[in-house]
Amino acid sequence: MESAQAIKDTIRNFVVAKFPLARKRGVGDADLLLEAGIVDSLGILDLVQFLETEFGLHIEDDELLPENFQSIDKLAEFVQTKHTTA
């Protein structure tokens, strides 16, 4: 499995490429993506599809919680947890 930093870098690259506000402002690992308006509810669906494709995950409906998608740090933690429980 990839390192935590590699996972964060992959997620950050996607967020910056996909979401214009992330490109404009830049985005740090701990920045609150939802609260800052960088990612909206439709953006979550894009993130889910990306995570499933990029990391070979299947994300269940009950895992679509705001806390799992708060920041790049939280997204990377979620990916790592899914890999260890899969």
Image (spheres, rainbow, N blue to C red):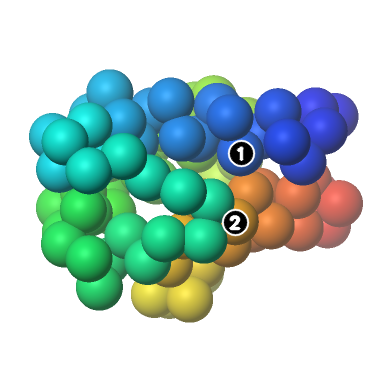
Q: Quadrant of the N terminus?
A: top right
Q: Is residue 77 at all visible to an observer of this figure?
A: yes
- Residue contact at pointers 1 and 2, CB within 8 angstroms: yes
**Relative vertical location of residue 83 with respect to residue 35 in this rendering, above or below:** above
Q: x and y percent of residue 14 in the render?
A: 38, 28
Q: x and y percent of residue 3 in the render?
A: 82, 33
Check disc 2: other Cα within 10 Å, few if <14, some if 14-19, many if 20+. many
Residue at (70, 28) in percent of width and height: 6
**Relative vertical location of residue 62 with respect to residue 51 in this rendering, above or below:** below
Q: Is residue 60 at all visible to an observer of this figure?
A: no
Residue at (28, 23) in percent of width and height: 17
Disc 1 marks a residue whose amino acid type is: Lys
Disc 2 marks a residue whose amino acid type is: Asp
Q: x and y percent of residue 12 in the render?
A: 46, 35
**Relative vertical location of residue 45 with respect to residue 10 in this rendering, above or below:** below
Q: Earlier in the sequence, mark 1 or mark 2?
A: 1
Kindly identify which numbered label has been placed on residue 73.
Answer: 2
* Spatial CA span between label 1 and label 2: 7 Å
Residue at (25, 73) in percent of width and height: 35
Q: x and y percent of residue 22 in the render?
A: 24, 40
Name the foreground residue: 6 vs 24: 24
Asked if residue 47 lies left or right of residue 75, the reply is: left
Asked if residue 38 lies left or right of residue 65, the reply is: left
Check disc 1: other Cα within 10 Å, few if <14, some if 14-19, many if 20+. many
Q: Which residue is mark 1?
A: 8
Secondary structure of residue under mark 1:
helix
Name the foreground residue: 57 vs 29: 29
Residue at (15, 43) in percent of width and height: 21
Kindly identify which numbered label has been placed on residue 60.
Answer: none
